[in-house]
Image: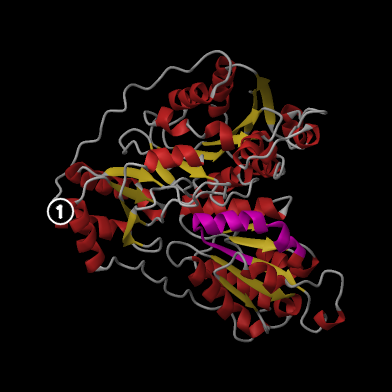
Amino acid sequence: MNGAESLVHTLLASGVEVCFANPGTSEMHFVAALDRIPGMRCVLGLQENVVTGMADGYWRMAGKPAATLLHCGPGLANGLANIHNARRARSGMVNCVGDQATYHRPFDAPLTADTEGFARGVSAWTRTVRRADEVGRDAAVAVQAARTSPGQVATLILPSDTCWDEATVGPAAALPVPAAPQADPMAIRNAARVLRDRKDVLILLGGLALTAEAQELAWRIAAHTGAALMAEGSNGRFERGRGRPPLERVPYPVDVALEALKPYTTIVLVNSRMPVGFFAYPGKPSLHCREDAEAVLLTRYEADPIQALTALAEELRAPAADLPDPGPRPEPARGAPTPEGLARTLAALMPDEAIVADESVSFGRGFFKETHCAPKHDWLQITGGAIGCGIPLATGAAVGAPGRRVINLQADGSGMYTLQGLWTQAREKLPVTTIVLSNRKYAILLGEYRGVGANPGRTAMDMMDLGNPDLDWVKLANGMGVEAAKTATLEGCADLMKQSFSREGPFVIELEI
């Protein structure tokens, strides 16, 4: 058995069943091992940022890590943006990165790079294997790190000789996954005291606290104490829809967020942190809450929120609480596209247990209000601000949750970063409906320009314009093997959505807005 075979056997024994890959010469022995050893599903991506984004989406839905196969330092560098998003989503993944053979590295060949240096900025755990005998051991530790609550990025760098040399030690057994930390009893009592004694309290949920079970416990506590309940602005996975609490997120625009959070003098943090702005703006605060707001920590992001919220509800003697009726499911909207109209159309037509991969950016900021009455669904958001996650995220989610329809709400400018993911959807026949919000501009940057107090002229406006020539998403999708159609009305979008939901494979709708 060589090192590559030891690696594959160890990954499989540790519960890693999918490898998202874009391999090169240094990884050929790993590729050969994947061919010889049954059990690993291999999904090809045409660019590494697609590969890493797919692994992120897979974790968010499957709750277990996939492996990625990346080609040396430059391949890892191509995938860094979506590894960054995965780190912010607290997703687990095991990056297997090829590298120069140990004896070849001193000669400084063209692909030689500071691969470990690239990896450390986005990884919770990084290691370069030294010998073939250590591959199995190190791979088992990498998977253990990736599965450590709430999920972590682990990067294993494999010089090519560690893959082709004989591994006399062989594969390693799976290592135990550390249990999620439990809340400090003192933190539970302190949060209970605050909720009993104070008015104007906000309970802020994030991460693991956005499962349906955790939300229902938090709703029970809020209903009993009179506290408000809200979610962080960007969340890896948010279980939403009918039968779940109608939670809103902390708004993105600084002034809107400050106004929304102005009433609260105390914020109880449940797997979340104090609301911080995406950017600094002249004369605006970095924290989007009152200056005198006090943070009360119930659970850190890696802790078990179910245990903590259950104990808190018992401490408060909070009874079960009914959820409000979100009202009837709406009819699809008609006319020219608006954010509210598209959200209502989505709520009207999405299948039960759909998955929404949201990279709608500025157009979709108000979608939550209009979709509380939709069927139960999961909502996946861009978490790290690195655009280009939507198409890969949807692709990986479809692999991680077989049989469920994925709806990708995709800004056109962001979609061009990782367009190649459509090809993988076609190759794997994945049930993904991509709605491209085609305004032919980086609309969010126009707002950011105003936010920082700059005065754009012709040159600046040209750099935010995606026209001249216009992007043609129907032709782009067709070139990737995906059927597509274009519409400029909400009724046209509704018809195309219904058609796509009846198909087994992917479909792209270009909605001109």
Image check: 179 left or right of 108? left
Look at the image and tell me in which quarter the C terminus lies: top right
Q: Camera-side residue: 54 or 166?
A: 54
Residue 363 can be seen in this image: yes
Q: Name the residue under label 1.
A: 316
Tell me the quarter of the picture where residue 103 sits. Answer: bottom right
Q: Where is residue 162 in the image (x, y as percent from the top left)?
A: 71, 79
**How many numbered marks does the figure carry?**
1
Tell me the quarter of the picture where residue 27 sits. Answer: bottom right
When the figure is inspected, residue 236 is found, relative to residue 64, above or below; the finding is: above
Residue 3: say if magenta: no
The residue at 60%/86% (across/down) is: 169
Q: Position of residue 399 (x, y in %)?
A: 55, 48
Please identify the residue farthest to the top as the structure is shown: 335
- The image's colouring method is secondary structure
Q: Position of residue 386 (x, y in %)?
A: 63, 50
Q: Residues within 10 Å of mark 1 (few under 14, many from 20)?
A: some
The residue at 48%/39% (across/down) is: 255
Q: Camera-side residue: 245 or 103?
A: 245
Image check: 249 left or right of 437? left
Q: Is mark 1 on a helix, strand or loop?
A: helix
The residue at 70%/45% (across/down) is: 418
What residue range appears in magenta? Answer: 74-95
Residue 22 can be seen in this image: no
Q: Camera-side residue: 253 or 234?
A: 253
Q: Where is residue 299 in the image (x, y as percent from the top left)?
A: 33, 61
Q: What residue type is labelled 1?
A: Leu
Look at the image and tell me in which quarter the N terminus lies: bottom right
Residue 89: say if magenta: yes
Image check: 191 left or right of 421? left
- Majority secondary structure in the magenta region: helix
